[in-house]
Amino acid sequence: MHREGAPDVESFSSPESGCAHMEFFVMKILLPIVLLVLFAGGCRSSSLPDVLEAPVGLDQCPQSPNCVFSGDRDAEHAILPWRIKGDLVTGWERICAEVVVLPRTTIVQKTPVYVHAECRSLIFRFVDDLECLLDPQSGVVAIRSSSRKGYSDFGVNRRRLETLRETLKTLDLID
């Protein structure tokens, strides 16, 4: 069946039409895509972090009680986020510095808006993940702390973030 205006099958296989179809493809499809990519890359603001540098958001907590997250709607997992007072860059750097001094804690990834730290338990050396994600527009820091293994953490992740919250409040870094 042949639609009006559509090229027929033979025109695709003939050598004369190959150049015309290639020209159509390059000029009408490929060139606009290339220009769009080049233009979009040139418009990126240098003051914002690369999209690939930080995650889009923090993961929700699993059903197990060994996680707390400021974006969770479940009361068992919910915790209030932090709001930075004053200069965001200075506040963020000082928050990251306070995360580093938590006992048995190592920062494994840090960007201008995201920090991921591993916190190890004292005796069995279990690893918990602590994450903070700054929203530069609002100054709100989403927080999450979760055990990698097991079912219950006996409240360790919540206590870790609440202790850190009190430290940051004492230092007048957050509301």
Image: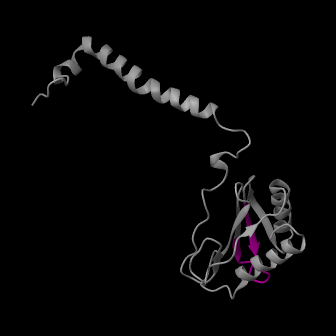
Q: Is residue 87 above or below residue 73?
A: above
Q: Is residue 118 magenta?
A: yes
Q: Position of residue 67 (x, y in %)?
A: 63, 78
Residue drawn where x is 85% and y is 73% of the image: 169
Residue drawn where x is 46% and y is 26% of the image: 32
- 126 and 58: which one is in front? 58
Task: From the viewer's perspective, tell me whether residue 37 is left or right of residue 159.
Answer: left
- Quarter the C terminus occupies: bottom right
Q: Position of residue 25 (x, y in %)?
A: 36, 23
Task: From the viewer's perspective, tell me whether residue 35 is left or right of residue 125.
Answer: left
Residue positioned most to the left: 1
- Quarter the N terminus occupies: top left
Residue drawn where x is 56% and y is 80% of the image: 74
Where on the picture, by quarter, is residue 41?
top right
Q: How many marks?
A: 0
Q: Main secondary structure of the magenta part?
A: strand
Residue drawn where x is 63% and y is 47% of the image: 51
Q: Position of residue 71 (x, y in %)?
A: 61, 71
Q: Is residue 40 magenta?
A: no
Residue positioned most to the top: 16
Magenta range: 115-129
Task: From the viewer's perspective, tell me whether residue 10 is left or right of residue 168.
Answer: left
Task: From the viewer's perspective, tell me whether residue 154 is left or right of residue 17.
Answer: right
Q: Is residue 50 above or below residue 69?
A: above
- 58 and 90: which one is in front? 90
Where on the picture, by quarter, is residue 5?
top left
Q: Position of residue 103 (x, y in %)?
A: 84, 75
